[in-house]
Structure formats: C-alpha cells, structure tokens
Amino acid sequence: MIAPTLAQWLDDSGMSTSNGVFITGTDTGVGKTWVGTQLIRVMRVLGREVIPRKPVESGWVSDLKQTDAWQLADAAGLPLDNTICPYRFTAALAPPRAARQAGTTLGLQQLAATCPTRWETRQFLHVEGAGGFYSPIAHDGVNADLAQILGLPIILVAEDRVGCMNHVLLIAEAIQHRALRLAGIILNARQTPIAGMDNRHDLQQYLDIPIMQFPCA
C-alpha cells in the first residue's frame, strides 16, 4: 500500500487506533526524530494524548532544543523532564559506550522501566530508540531487544537514497524473525532524489505494508 498522506498512512498502518509505537531506523541520522515529531503532531490532531519517551540519548548538548528528547516533548505539547529522557550522555557514541565513559552502565531493564506499562485508551505511547534496529542501546542488548521487551508495533525510518532497499529488507526480516509487527515504513528524503529512483514503489514489490515517502527534512 502506498499512502499519499501521513493521515492515510496512519490509518493504513493501524497507528491511528494503536496504543503506541516503537520508532527505529536503518541507521543513525536517518531522521527518526523529525519523522516522530510529525507523527506525534498528527496523532494529537486526531485527539490522542501522546506520551513521548526517548529512554536514552547520547550526544546530549546544553542547548536543550537541539536534543531529540526536547523535540519529541515539544511536539507532544509537554515540557522536557526526566521521565521523557532519564538517561543522557554527552559523548556522541552508542549509549552503552557513552555510559561507560560517564562511569556507569546501562541495562535493558532500566530502559524498559522508563516506559509506562499501562495507559488510557486516549493516550498513545511513542518510544524512540537510539540508532538503528541492531545498534547497541544498553550493555546487555540492542534496540531490537528493547523493542521486543516493550512489544509495541514498529515503524521503520530509512533515508530515501540509493542502497536503502537492502537495509530496509534486512531489518524487515529481522523484525519478522523476532515475532514483532512492522506497522509501516517511512522513507525520509533528506536530499534531492536521483532521477529515476523510486524506492517506495520498488519496496512495495517485497513488502505488503504501508510505505510513505516524506519530503526533505
């Protein structure tokens, strides 16, 4: 299914009526947070109260507005506090390595505990991972492990460029292997696409899930 608008994509993917989502990417820097803020704003228009969570963020900067956690909180209409992102590390490295540099360790259960286990029907839990699906997120696991603990539907964000199909299809297979639900894919066009490239249509030959292409972020 090729969704022409974000609202339609949310309907097609089941997100508009879901209780939450886990946002992951094919890699670091593909636009998970930017895509996430757009999703959060649309969910609010649909009448949902969004609970944003960024369990851990490395590369934390003093200008809070430049952090992923602040942007997610702002999109949800909330002030940034420690419940949204309790684990913050200044080193721009994978979270477990950044944590070690800060003299501490970070476990999967610690990260999972940052997310509520019960919430009201009108609420929507929006959890953003760190890096790609198989990027390390704790000393004892990767993003995929955290997603499995939480059990939420997954949205996969990929940069819309030559070569992304390989990454998308590999991660889609990994998600299926872990018995998780891949609700949909968003291709984030961060640069002007190469003439003739159409990853959205090409991926649809292999995946029967909603795929949407975002404009330049």
Image (spheres, helix red, strand yellow):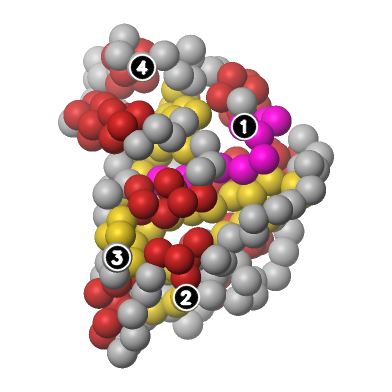
Task: Answer whether labels 4 and 2 touch (C-beta < 8 Å).
Answer: no
Q: Earlier in the sequence, mark 2 or mark 3?
A: 2
Magenta residues?
15-24
> Which label was assigned to residue 140?
3
Viewer-proximal residue among 85 and 162: 85
Point out the frontmost of discs 2 and 3: 3
Mark 1 Cα shell of 10 Å, populated few (<14), some (14-19), many (≥20): many
Q: Where is residue 133 in the image (x, y as percent from the top left)?
A: 32, 46
Q: What element carries label 3?
A: loop
From the image, tell me which residue sits under label 1: 15
> In the figure, 128 relative to 122: above or below?
below
Residue type at tag 3: Asp
Residue tagged by mark 2?
87
The disc, 3 or 1, on the residue closer to the chain's N-terminal end is: 1
Amino acid type, residue under disc 4 in the picture: Leu
As drawn, is 103 to the left or to the right of 40? left
Which type of secondary structure does the marked residue at label 1 adopt? Answer: helix
Q: Label 4, on which residue?
A: 207
Task: Report the amino acid beneath label 1.
Answer: Met
Q: Which of marks 2 and 1 is nearer the N terminus?
A: 1
Tell me if label 3 and label 4 are in contact, CB under 8 Å: no
Q: Do the residues labelled 1 and 4 touch (CB within 8 Å)?
A: no
Mark 3 and mark 1: Cα distance apart in space: 30 Å
Residue closest to the eye, 137 or 66: 137
What kind of residue is marked 2? Tyr
